[in-house]
Image (cartoon, helix red, strand yellow):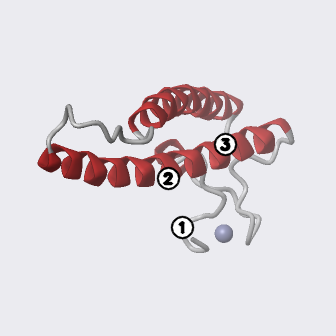
Amino acid sequence: MTEKETIEIKKIIKEQISSINDDIVELTELTKPISLDNSIGRLSRMDAINNKAINEKALRDKKQTLQKLNRALERYEDGKLGICLKCSQEIPFGRLKFMPHTTRCVNCA
Ligand SMILES: [Zn+2]
C-alpha cells in the first residue's frame, strides 16, 4: 500500500468507528428492559420482545466489529495495517477498503 492509501484506510476506519459508536448508542437504547405496564397490549409487547432480541444481536455484532476496528487502528499505529496475519503478505487495497478491519488476505481468510 502506498502512504496515501494507508491514510485513506485510516480515515475509513475512523469513520466506521464513529458511525458504529452512534449505532451502539441507539441499539443500547432499543435493548433496554421492556416495560411490563399495561399501557402496551400483549401483542405489541410480543413484538417488542422480538425486536429486542434482534437488536440485542445487532448490538453484539456491532460491538465485535468495533473491537476489530480498534485493533486495526492499533495495527496502523504499529505500521502493520494491511499485512496478513497468517502469511505476512500485503492485503490488497480494494479488500481493505471494503473491510478495513480484516487481518487476513483472501487466500488465508
Ligand atoms: Zn495471507
Q: Is residue 29 left or right of residue 92?
A: left
Residue 13 falls in image quadrant:
top right
Foreground tag (2 vs 3): 2
Residue 6 falls in image quadrant:
top right
Residue at position x 52%, y 52% in the image: 60
10 Å neighbourhood of mark 2: few (<14), some, or many (≥20)? few
Which of 83/56 is in front?
56
Q: Does mark 1's beta carbon lie closer than 8 Å to ligand 1?
A: yes
Residue at position x 45%, y 38% in the image: 32
Q: Does mark 2's beta carbon lie closer than 8 Å to ligand 1?
A: no
Q: Quadrant of the C terminus?
A: bottom right
The image shows residue 15 at horizontal and vertical percentages of 54, 26
Residue matched to label 1: 106
**Kind of residue indicated by mark 3:** Met
Give the alpha-carbon distance from disc 1 to disc 2, as whole Å.
22 Å
Residue 1: which numbered mark, if any?
Answer: 3
Q: Earlier in the sequence, mark 1 or mark 3?
A: 3
Which of 8/99 is in front?
99
Q: Is residue 58 left or right of residue 103?
A: left
Residue 57: which numbered mark, if any?
Answer: none
Which of 13/86 is in front?
13
The image shows residue 90 at horizontal and vertical percentages of 68, 56
Marks 1 and 2: CB-CB under 8 Å?
no
10 Å neighbourhood of mark 1: few (<14), some, or many (≥20)? few
Residue matched to label 2: 61
Q: Quadrant of the N terminus?
A: top right
**Kind of residue indicated by mark 1:** Val
10 Å neighbourhood of mark 3: few (<14), some, or many (≥20)? some
Q: Secondary structure at mark 1?
A: loop
Q: Quadrant of ligand 1?
A: bottom right
